[in-house]
Image (cartoon, helix red, strand yellow):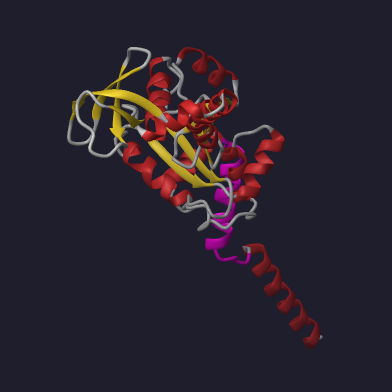
Amino acid sequence: MNKGIVMEIHRKYAILLTKDGSFEKGIILTEHAERGDEVIFQPVSGKPRWRRYWDKTPIAVRLSAIVLLMLLIFGYPLFHGMGDTETHAYVAIDINPSIELELNDELMVTDVNALNGSADKLLEEINSVQDKPIHSVLTHIVDESENRGLAEQRRMIVGVSCENQNGNPRELISQINPYIETLPDWDVATLIIPEEVRELAKNENKSMNEVMATELANHNVDVEQAHFDMTDANNRAIINFFYGEQESDINRSIKQEKTPIKPKNNELTDDVSDDEDSGQDESL
């Protein structure tokens, strides 16, 4: 118990003079106390309750709590950012430079891969495109390709592939299309690339668009699934510009599907001759 002489009495506390000559706030426990009386009192701390408990906590516990708090404050954004770098979609862009972009689930570019020499040179010159939205990066690539004379024909293929079946490539294309529509002087074909085609392109170290053109020509991919109209002359012209052999195969396959097979003239002549010969034989 603390003892002191009452100096002042307030409604909720009193000011007391202790034996060591210091003044303290306290609650008087002695009944009917007046100023000048020596009383027993309970000190009243000006610190909040949590601070009083904190002061009584061992130093090791305090340090552990501080470290944990720092991890929560600074560590969460770090871990959250690391999660954002996980690849959820790929976008292959073929102009003259052939570039593949990796996107996270927020459709922000997390990595860029050059697939030919022109792309290597282009990426050396442009500023960092990481952590930027896809339409912004696509704008940057097109502008730099034009400025460096790498897009004289102004033709482009944009292929989109999602990491898993839960992805929605059509949604990604819908976000790219508004920018493509601002390029009136460009001919652009868009493709949805199935996951198995993307894996094949990765193994062959080729553009997804190039492998996709081959798969379309060989009827290995459902055209509707690829979001690509093989009968569209503009689309075929774009494919032909980049991959002439594949376009020829596509044209040939279309003609085979649309043109009925007609007998040759010599076949008709042969049939008539055979009939005439047989008639002569019977007369003989």
Residue bounds of the magenta highlight:
243-263
> x%, y% of residue 265?
62, 63
The quadrant of the rendering that contains the N terminus is top left
The total of numbered circles placed on residues is 0
> Could you tell whether 227 is left or right of 278 in the image?
left
Instruction: Give the quarter of the image for residue 139.
Output: top left
> x%, y% of residue 182?
29, 35
**Residue at the bottom extreme, as displayed:** 283
The residue located at (42%, 34%) in the rendering is 134
> Could you tell whether 99 is left or right of 136 in the image?
right
Instruction: Give the quarter of the image for residue 59.
Output: top right
- Does 52 appear in magenta? no
- Does 252 appear in magenta? yes
Instruction: Give the quarter of the image for residue 259.
Output: bottom right
The residue located at (56%, 18%) in the rendering is 120
Q: From this viewpoint, is residue 94 visible?
A: no
> x%, y% of residue 15?
24, 24
The residue located at (44%, 16%) in the rendering is 127
